[in-house]
Amino acid sequence: MGLHLVTGFPGFLGARLLPRLLELAPEDRVVCLVQPKFADFAKAEVARLEAAHPHVRGRMELTEGDIVAADLGLRDATLKDRVTSAFHLAAVYDLAVGRDFAIKVNVEGTRNVLRFLASCRQLERHHYISTCYVSGDHKGVFRETDLELGQGFKNFYEETKYLAEVEVARSGLPTTVYRPGIVVGDSRTGETAKFDGPYFVMTAMERLPSPGVFLRVGSGRSPAGIVPVDYVIEGIARLATSSVSLGKTYQLTDPEPLTAFELSKVVAAALGRSFVYLPVPAGFARALFQPKFVQRLLGLPLQSLDYFDHDCAYDTTRAVADLGAMGVRCPRFADYVGTLVAFYRKERDRVRRTAMV
């Protein structure tokens, strides 16, 4: 019987991961570190999960704290004696985040978690949720074994997630690292908690005249690292409950991604929109979108343009092999884009477009 400490609850990934994790580990329990300002939301989320997933009833506890506080701001001194593993999901997921805040949460917060775990007497495993985009501006193939390659970064989100993963790698804790790509909704239901990434493209396409013109930024040949949340959750849960994953890093993204141009065409078709694609250099596109009113008009933030011409491919050899042996495979984007569009059209006025912080 194990006790898993989880940060980042009641965020979208954490709320989806815990029922599956507890299903696969029926003797285990979880304790969720929750910021005081989210305490009521977290209690409501536990009640919702217990109603939807009877097997989690009585197996989830909440404790108030904050990863940016010394010793995680915990009042429960017994946790150091009880925790056997941890899932560190808490982070700022926002391309436009300022550097000071990103350093405080993503880097210093991770250091605090690592220090706490180093003092846990029964700790067996640490599971760290990173991102493929620790690759920064690296060009070519970025392997699951790569990290410190001298890369620069397109924004402070990338930089601070990289710095955090470096801290994890140097901690010496028994760790598995999971690097999702750009996470979109559930491939089966379309459900998501945040409309960003490819959803910005949907918004822009719906606001532009059709037939009409849509920009193709850069070559359009860069791979689009899109991944549905159900694959990420199943991947983490299955790998976390297997000894095969100890000490490894997994890039959880589409092993056969569409190019950015192909992605645009597939999304347009799913929306029933028709465009002629006008190729423009990335620098020109950034200048065009620099005015705030243009970004508001099209619902396309300036920071998102960097990912239309991101010349980096993510190696998924280890993830494909280990998850494939468990019968877990990443769905093809073209097979579920219609589901994403249907959910977007139904819920676009009720789902967030900003990070939960």
Image (cartoon, helix red, strand yellow):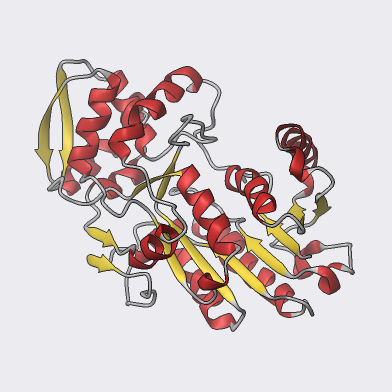
In the image shown, does 110 or 97 lie closer to the viewer? 110
> Residue 174, how many percent across, how many down?
60, 78
Q: In this view, does 55 lie above or below 138?
A: above
Q: Give the side of residue 153 with respect to residue 51, left or right.
A: left
Q: Where on the picture, by quarter, is residue 299?
A: top left
> Residue 184, how many percent across, how many down?
43, 40
Does residue 300 appear in the picture of this structure?
no
For the point 40% across and 58% down, which residue is it?
324
For the point 38% across and 59% down, which residue is it?
133
Q: Give the side of residue 291 with respect to residue 167, left or right.
A: left
Does residue 3 appear in the picture of this structure?
yes
Q: How many labels does the image show?
A: 0
In the image shown, does 329 or 103 lie closer to the viewer? 329
> Residue 31, how many percent across, how many down?
78, 56
Q: Is residue 78 above or below residue 238?
A: below
In the image shown, does 197 or 327 lie closer to the viewer? 327
> Residue 139, how many percent across, how many down?
22, 65
